[in-house]
Amino acid sequence: MEIFFIGLSFLGILLFERYGLKTELPWMGKLCFLCGQIITIRSLPQESMTEGMVLLIYIYCLFWQDLKTYYISKKWIVPSLFLILYLGFPQNWLSSVSGALLYGLPSFAMHRFKPEWIGLADVVYFFYFGALLGLERMIVACLIAIGIGFFWMLGMKKTILPFCSCLSIGVWIAYLKGYTILISFADLLG
């Protein structure tokens, strides 16, 4: 049933882009309510709007699935494969492979030796999002996810953390502004 609604959402986005999207966007030139800057074309992600909306729906569903159940079912494999085929890998395939391996292998080792620390779905999504975002943006996604997870554990006072939910937030932010955040952070340090 979940796959049906995810597929229906994808279809709605594609129809909206084809028939409902106007070239003039009403919020261009207005002030961003988060940062106070004027919104320009450069404020948008480098990827197309449809790709961003498809990823947002996927991440939103993944976030709520993990948050409510602490479990990611195997039904998520089909939408995940569809998404990576639809969005494609970063232009630099070496970044994609190194991102998947650099984040997937240590998390797999952690799951192998301490399975109570990290679930298998977290391991799979470290591989997956590492390949999808590439090495550079995955750094930003992980730092954001760890920060959110840390404050989540402090605020909720629970012993189990739905880390895929935290990782989903980090991935969305890194997808939109990952390179900008990484460059700003590097400038801050050096």
Image (cartoon, helix red, strand yellow):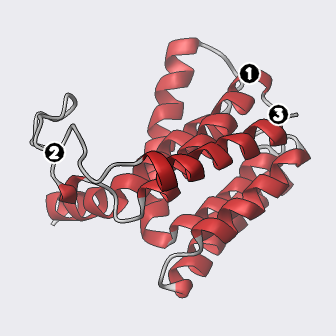
Residue 19 lies, with reference to residue 105, above or below; the image says above
- Gap in angstroms between the C-alphas marked 2 and 3: 38 Å
Q: Which residue is mark 3?
A: 71
Q: Residues within 10 Å of mark 2 (few under 14, many from 20)?
A: some
Q: Which residue is mark 1?
A: 68
Q: Which comes sooner in the sequence, label 1 or label 2?
A: 2
- Give percent across and percent down for residue 25: 25, 44
- Drawn side of residue 34 relative to residue 38, left or right: right
Question: Can residue 82 be seen by looking at this rendering?
Answer: yes
Residue 66 lies, with reference to residue 20, above or below; the image says above
- Give percent across and percent down for residue 105: 71, 68
Q: Nearer the viewer, residue 102 or 76?
A: 76
Q: Residues within 10 Å of mark 3 (few under 14, many from 20)?
A: some
Identify the element where label 3 is drawn: loop
- Gap in angstroms between the C-alphas marked 1 and 2: 34 Å
Identify the element where label 1 is drawn: helix
Q: Amino acid at mark 3?
A: Tyr
Question: Can residue 72 be seen by looking at this rendering?
Answer: no
Q: Depth-wise, is mark 1 or mark 2 nearer the camera?
A: 2
- Drawn side of residue 5 relative to residue 100, left or right: right
Q: Residues within 10 Å of mark 1 (few under 14, many from 20)?
A: few
- Gap in angstroms between the C-alphas marked 3 and 1: 8 Å
Q: Quadrant of the N terminus?
A: top right
Q: Amino acid at mark 1?
A: Lys
The residue under the point 57% across, 13% down is 156
The residue under the point 68% across, 70% down is 85
Q: Amino acid at mark 2?
A: Ile
Q: Nearer the viewer, residue 158 or 81?
A: 81
Q: Which residue is mark 2?
A: 39
- Give percent across and percent down for residue 36: 11, 33
